[in-house]
Image (cartoon, helix red, strand yellow):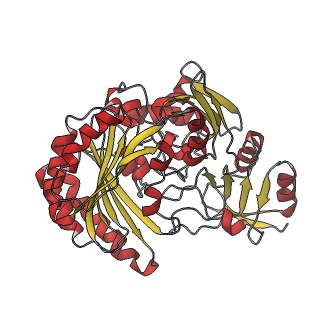
Amino acid sequence: MADQRINTTSGAETGLTATAIEQFKGSLRGELLCPGDDHYDSARTIHNGMIDRRPALIVRCAGVADVMVAVTFARSYNLVVAVRGGGHGVPGFAVCDGGLMIDLSRMKSVRVDPVGRTARAEGGTTWGDFDHETQAFGLATTGGIARPTGIAGLTLGGGHGYLMRTYGLSCDNLLSVDVVTADGRLLTASATENADLFWGVRGGGGNFGVVAAFEYRLHPVSQMLGGLLIYPMAQAKDLFRFYRDYTRTVPDALGSLINLATLPDGTPAVVILIAYSGDLDEGERLLRPLREFGSLLADQVGPLPYIALQSIVENFNPPGLRNYWKSNYLSDLSDAAIDVMVDHYRTVPAPNTHVVIEHLGGAVSRVGADETAVDHREAPYNFLIVGMWADAAEDAKVIGWVRELWGALQPFSSGGLYVNYEAEHDVDRVKAAYSPVKYARLVAVKDKYDPTNLFRLNQNIKPAG
């Protein structure tokens, strides 16, 4: 191996000798990649096609011992550190320029206890991996709405998903985590052990260490009533208002999203994604008002396995496209907010770009305000603007369109945001995700477990020092 130029946490560039790199490589069970090595480019490629960064070193960890060695090495040389779980996050925190990328994507073990209804999964596991194992026993927990999403990033930021109204967020179903902290130690955090750290990782993101394993509570979930109801765009405003009134009274077992989207044939449409986890006959009765509203272009809702439901969104968000997202919670889905969204969507600059309204409430809102770092649980809806396009030449146009709509919706925002949906990660946007009291508490956790801010490629909570 050759010497490498590296970026340090001080912002300066320095050198790393071939001897030091060889010694590091020899201490690993997994693979160490440098620029020019086979698989280097594939290892640094993630879901968002806008992210094109080149780490000096990539450690493809084989287990937690490799994670501990990698963190210790990074701290010793003051390296910039990126941590890759599923590699699905839009800001691209999984990859750095000129630093050390700790890649967990080969750590995918999932062990299910069907009697105790728990599962323990390593940090590189995706929700597709996780659900494949838990569904063998008719069990699941709240996970992302697309199988390629990593369990780590989603859970650490809170964890929206189809089952959240029934069972809470992903982080609400955490029982424990194993965390490699900035000093290279492996700690277990739970309600009874390192409880301050356990509180912080449930909503505070990757600020406090590398989470090598997650233990979840599971619930009986197998057959769902789900799929897509597709309506003509001409009905958009009336349908959004109907959806607002309809969702005010639906049971927790009904999860749903309403979207402004462009169909594969180029037709603008309104799409409602249904995920009902209760009795199928009751679900059919519950959905009748939606099916009888206006004139449906397509009714693709029916009984289906939970895993099949999890695969639907993948068809609308293929890997490699350029992504820029912005989001905020809504205190209400008002007529004026609906008008802004629908009118603005008429000028959508790219067919894959869409606008999503998530229905929250239910179990999400019943978790105590102080139980986790997640905030703004009282919000009934969340809006997400998904800028998605193929051509880099269109970057300014699409990003500008997303920002313009986001700005126009600010008068209707409840003031908070869900960190997993945000492309921007400056300090003001991070602080908007938490109340001042919670943010101060997160800073205290950061001060204790990562006082030098080694783990800074995230929705960063800077230590007080």
Which residue is outermost to the bottom?
A: 393
Up-down: is 435 above or below 154? above
Q: Can residue 444 be seen in this view?
A: no
Which residue is outermost to the front?
A: 281
Q: Where is residue 197 in the image (x, y as percent from the top left)?
A: 55, 30
Q: Where is residue 90 in the image (x, y as percent from the top left)?
A: 47, 58
Residue appearing at x 37%, y 26% in the figure? 367
Q: Position of residue 377 (x, y in %)?
A: 32, 34
Q: Is residue 454 visible?
A: yes
Residue appearing at x 55%, y 46% in the figure? 127
* Picture quarter with the N terminus: bottom right
Up-down: is 91 above or below 420? below
Residue appearing at x 59%, y 24% in the figure? 194
Nearest the eye: 411 or 274: 274
Up-down: is 398 above or below 282? below
Nearest the eye: 438 or 299: 299
Residue appearing at x 71%, y 58% in the figure? 58
Tag count: 0
Q: Where is residue 402 in the image (x, y as percent from the top left)?
A: 31, 65
Find residue 261 and report its image quarter: bottom left
Q: Residue 424 vs residue 289: left or right?
A: right
Q: Residue 41 vs residue 249: left or right?
A: right
